[in-house]
Image (tube, rainbow, N blue to C red):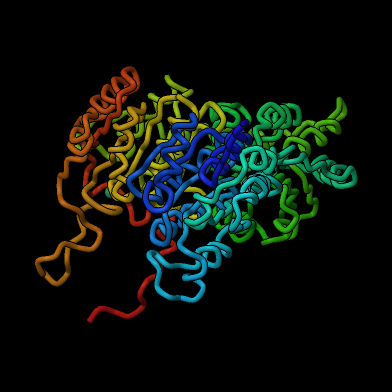
Amino acid sequence: PQIAAEPELTDGFHLVIDALKLNDITTIYGVPGIPITDLGRLAQAEGMRVISFRHEQHAGNAAAIAGFLTKKPGVCLTVSAPGFLNGLTALANATTNCFPMILISGSSEREIVDLQQGDYEEMDQLAIAKPLCKAAFRVLHAEDIGIAVARAIRAAVSGRPGGVYLDLPAKLFSQVLDATKGEKSLVKVIDAAPAQIPAPSAIKRALDVLKGAKRPLIVLGKGAAYAQADDLVRELVERTGIPYVPMSMAKGLLPDTHPLSAGAARSTALKDSDVVLLVGARLNWLLSHGKGKTWGAPGSKKFIQIDIEPKEMDSNVEIVAPVVGDIGSCVEALLAGVDANWPAVPSDWTETLKAKKEANVSKMAAKLGKNAAPMDFHGALGALKTVIQERPDAILVNEGANTLDLARGIIDMYQPRKRLDVGTWGIMGIGMGFAIAAAVETGKPVLAVEGDSAFGFSGMEVETICRYNLSVCIVVFNNNGIYRGTDVNPTGGEDVAPTVFVADARYDKMMEAFGGVGVNVTTPDELKRAVDAAMDSGRPTLINAVIDPAAGTESGNIGSLNPQSVVKKK
Ligand code: ADP
Ligand code: MG
């Protein structure tokens, strides 16, 4: 008698993994725990790279920046309720920054959660995630996993990219399905981020405005860096001869040393330009909302804006020539109109910017050469500027207050997508998550330049860096506190001031605890040598850079955002 063969089975675990792999998602960033521990194990067994963190926020930040670097959604995997909430900060930040990512979180039993009967880690995660991301989906049946993953990918990368939440209740993972049926339920997403071609009339309008400019300016934002249309963007700048200013994560799209870069003459460029072409940059607080004294006399400016998101137009001021589409397609269409008759940029404008730039660069150079101890920010950053000049393919991660603002101005970038920083929110805490993903995704050496306060938010991830033996060199600018280390408690009481840390802490010892290299440096020369050694060896390294506690200003460049008390002291 013949025995019928048992049908081969698959289950929720395997369908999630297969759906991701089918769509070329090969890395998961996360923190294991109930109910997703086995999902991580099985994903690794199935050949995926599974990078485990010590806290979900950093895994989420890693996924988000992986999305920025690769144009594929970065995936973060978290446990229910508290783990989910920890990851949610990163999801919201990804959405704010237009980085594609998918937060996949396990969740507790629907029936119990919905009746609020008090389950283990009970929380209505889908409802909480919804306002903080582009799209949020929950999957109740294993046969829907393929569609759900496809929708999540499409939502994350199409149009304006952003964060997507995928809620997977614990019960889903063990649901079984006939393997053939399971395989058929998977969806390979075709053309996940379709080209969005601008209307010819919009291109003509933009070209007409641009042609009439006397003092034109191009502003490149991180959307332009994300778009990976590097050659087209460069061609637009060079063929029109229009000076450009890069936003911080667009630095290096063209080298900061490019003759048409007006980065070092930013204030003049924004204030005195008459026509501004925004390429993947929003007129938000980082550009003073397109108005006020940053932008010169009221009504003196015409804005042309290229953006994939139609709602971005007129968000702060009138856009006289909106160009809606993806940056590659839009820039290509503009270039078709830049012919031999294209008017040269008036030389008084380019000369004005050039003179301003040269003056600012030489003023800055004088501050960078000092080899004094204790170091100030300029001395230390002068050394790091040389490091990046000598190693232009290294990735620079940067956060802090003074450490951020000064590094952005001082360290020139030479290649696209090499500068990763605090982004649209100006948040602290992205450091180690970004550094880890940058190393994992690109295989290039990473230099993380961190204020001591900023580093504290993700510092425990140095263990993760050591565990995966990543070529990450962290430099902690240690000035004993937030902004400065010299504030005093006005009451004379025992507690230090709220902005002050343990004096003379040795962050380098943290790295040594996990087998990495720790170095303490007090001069720019020592700093340069230590970073070079780290990058040559590729070993995880943390350099404690001793900075004068009195160096630094309140909130770096954005002190004006601090509300001041008007009540006089008694
Ligand atoms: P920055 O802070 O550097 O000025 P923003 O994050 O404010 O940059 O702006 C990025 C803009 O780029 C967003 O408005 C986003 O919609 C847009 N964007 C992102 N990717 C693309 C793309 N591929 N094509 C067109 N616009 C894009
Ligand atoms: Mg500090």
In the figure, 221 relative to 355: above or below?
below
Q: Residue at x 90, y 46 (%)?
A: 201
Q: Residue at x 85, y 42 (%)?
A: 203
Q: Residue at x 55, y 53 (%)?
A: 286
Q: Quadrant of residue 118?
A: bottom left
Report whether residue 383 is seen.
no
In the figure, 129 relative to 191: above or below?
below
Q: Quadrant of residue 387?
A: top left
Q: Position of residue 348 (x, y in %)?
A: 69, 36
Q: Position of residue 499 (x, y in %)?
A: 25, 59
Foreground pick, 73 / 536: 73
Report whether residue 500 is seen.
yes
Q: Position of residue 448 (x, y in %)?
A: 37, 36
Q: Quadrant of residue 181?
A: top right
Q: Position of residue 278 (x, y in %)?
A: 69, 46
Q: Quadrant of the C terminus?
A: bottom left
Foreground pick, 90 / 530: 90
Farthest residue in the front direction? 1
Q: Quadrant of the N terminus?
A: top right
